[in-house]
Image (cartoon, grey):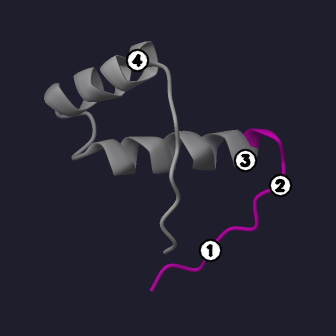
């Protein structure tokens, strides 16, 4: 995995924090990864990764 720096509006960060606090995601990174994956799938630009 590669590290990226991302600037988000406070409202987005607050929403992500709420998802983590409600135990929907274990942490902010996982919530953001999930959102990015869903966007890529929606836009049909995703090559599924084979998970080991």
Q: Earlier in the sequence, mark 2 or mark 4?
A: 4
In magenta, the rendered stretch is 42-52
Of tags 2 and 4, the one toward the viewer is 4
Task: Specify whether 44 is left or right of 5.
Answer: right
**Residue highlighted by disc 4:** 10
Crowd rating for badge 4 (residues with CA inside 10 Å; few <14, some 14–19, many 20+):
few
How many angstroms separate mark 2 from mark 4 (CA)? 28 Å
Are circles 4 and 1 on residues that touch, CB within 8 Å?
no
Q: Position of residue 36 (x, y in %)?
A: 59, 45
Residue at 32 percent of width and 18 percent of height: 14
Q: Which residue is mark 1?
A: 49
Q: CA distance from mark 3 to mark 4?
A: 26 Å
For residue 37, the mark is none
Q: Residue furthest top?
A: 11
Estimate how packed mark 3 is, as few (under 14), some (14 to 19) or many (20 or more) residues with alpha carbons within 10 Å.
few
Residue, x 84% and y 48% (percent of image)? 44
How far separated are the C-alphas under marks 3 and 2? Answer: 6 Å
Quadrant location of the C terminus?
bottom left
Which residue in the protein does label 3 denote? 41
Tell me the element at label 2.
loop
């Amino acid at each position: 995995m590669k590290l990226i720096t991302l600037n988000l509006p406070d409202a987005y960060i607050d929403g992500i924090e709420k998802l983590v606090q409600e135990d929907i995601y274990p942490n902010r990174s996982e919530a953001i990864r999930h959102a990015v994956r869903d966007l890529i799938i929606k836009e049909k630009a995703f090559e599924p990764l084979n998970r080991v």
